[in-house]
Image (tube, rainbow, N blue to C red):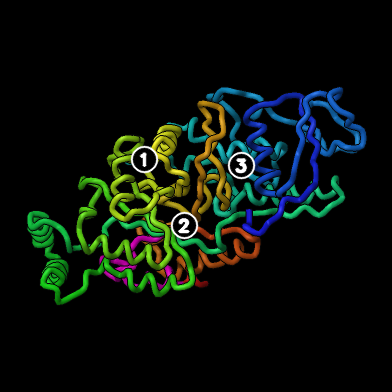
Amino acid sequence: MRKNAKITKVLVLIYSSFKSPRLEYVLDYLFIKRMGLEYSLVDSLESSDLEGKITISYADVTIENAWNILPDNLLKESEILKSIDCSRYSNASNCPDPLAFIFFHLSRYEEYLNHEVDQHGRFQYKNSILSKTNVSSVLNLPQVDILVQQFAEKLSQYTHQTIQVLNSDLPSVCPSIDIDSVFAYKGRPIIRHIGAMLKDLFKLRWHEISKRLSVLAKTTKDPNDNFDYQLQILSNTQAHYFIQCGPYGQFDKNIALSNSEFQSIIRQLIQHGHVIGLHPSYSSDSDPDKIKREKELLEKTFQIEVKNSRQHFLKMRLPQTYRALLACGIESDWSMGYSEEFGYRAGTACPFNWFDLEKNCTTKLRIVPFFAMDVVFKQFKNTTPQNCLHTTLPMRDWLKKNNLPFVFVFHNESLSQQRGWKGWQIVFEKWVKG
């Protein structure tokens, strides 16, 4: 919801033959968070004088002069059904039960049903019902947001008032930057330099050896240290930075947070008003004790409170990872997206509260979805910066036109102009400034 938005005093009366935590979650999301409306849910036609008041009937009975929505069973259940027809939730344009559609995608129901994961234990975009539809734009366009807008327009007919959708408290452009390796060469023990140069020598990568030696000799700036450039581009835009500060490992390559130059960079980001969050190490996946140690190290080092997090490699398991984050005091997770495809994993561009499907309850964890990540286009789609912009800028403009936030992910390595990233700075600049 926009910061200056006011709750509209329109009471929407909803009759349903049942009440459930799932139904209440969707109604709170739809009416309070997305439309700023008050609502009253009644489950008995005798419980109140409904004549002339009811707006929506979410039941098997038809009520005259009401918007009658025939519910499927998804919101009535309290358990996870192992076999459901996911195709019912494949497209907002032909959805018979909009409330169930919203719940299916926000709860990430399909991720509890499909246990086929990639090498990092991640749910794959190709298994999402939005990816399987024959309409190519369904995954790319936020289907839940489209449905909310359609819902508001139809509701206006029954309330005889124009219902406005309140989309997000995020700015129209919201950059987020992962710092997996603050430096490409600096700050590492000598044994790692020797090992890396031996590999480069074996593969005849003379440029890498030369670059490493010149950085270590302090005659050339480390390519990953491009934060002055970032601050220049972000001069009028607040970014969220996610810092990897866990122990060294196969997929955790950052230097120790005790490094003074590393600390100096993070303090500079803080001084410029950017938000610092945690990038939990690969090895800490779903382990609250490890995540808590890394979070406390980040907080103690910079005397800040860390409330935001994004999983390294987007390595996330439901419900374990989100429960671990909650146990560590994380308030917002920014992992809701794909590393190999752009689009909306949960069908929305707007933040929402996580619903713990196994416990059948709403939680306080705020989920912030993102549209695209830099590596999607270069590494997995093997495209050029120009083709990337041709694909993404129209979507950025569409989001702005529809008052929806454009959240994206970049890495400082991607702005280094090294190791295949030459020319990609223009994508960062255009995503930030259009």
Circle 3/circle 1 CB separation < 8 Å:
no
Q: Which residue is mark 3?
A: 90
What amino acid is labelled 2 in the image?
Ala
What amino acid is labelled 3 in the image?
Ser
Residue 406 on image: x %, y % = 53, 60
Up/down of 395 relative to 75, above or below: below
Up/down of 55 relative to 297, above or below: above
Q: Could you tell whether 89 is left or right of 291 in the image?
A: right
Residue 133 on image: x %, y % = 58, 45
Q: Label 2's element?
A: strand
Q: Decide if residue 183 is in sight here.
A: yes
Q: In this orientation, which residue lies closer to the viewer: 68 or 363?
A: 363
Up/down of 321 relative to 141, above or below: above
Q: How many numbered circles does the render carry?
A: 3
Residue most extreme to the front = 303
Residues under labels 3 and 2: Cα distance? 21 Å
What amino acid is labelled 1 in the image?
Asp
Q: Which residue is mark 2?
A: 372
Q: Which residues are magenta?
A: 410-429
Residues under labels 2 and 1: Cα distance? 19 Å
Q: Earlier in the sequence, mark 3 or mark 1?
A: 3
Circle 3/circle 2 CB separation < 8 Å:
no
Q: Nearer the viewer, mark 3 or mark 2?
A: 2
Q: Which residue is mark 1?
A: 118
Q: Label 1's element?
A: loop
Residues packed near mark 2 inside 10 Å, few (<14), some (14 to 19) or many (20 plus): many
Residue 358 on image: x %, y % = 51, 26
The answer to which quarter of the image holds residue 413 is: bottom left
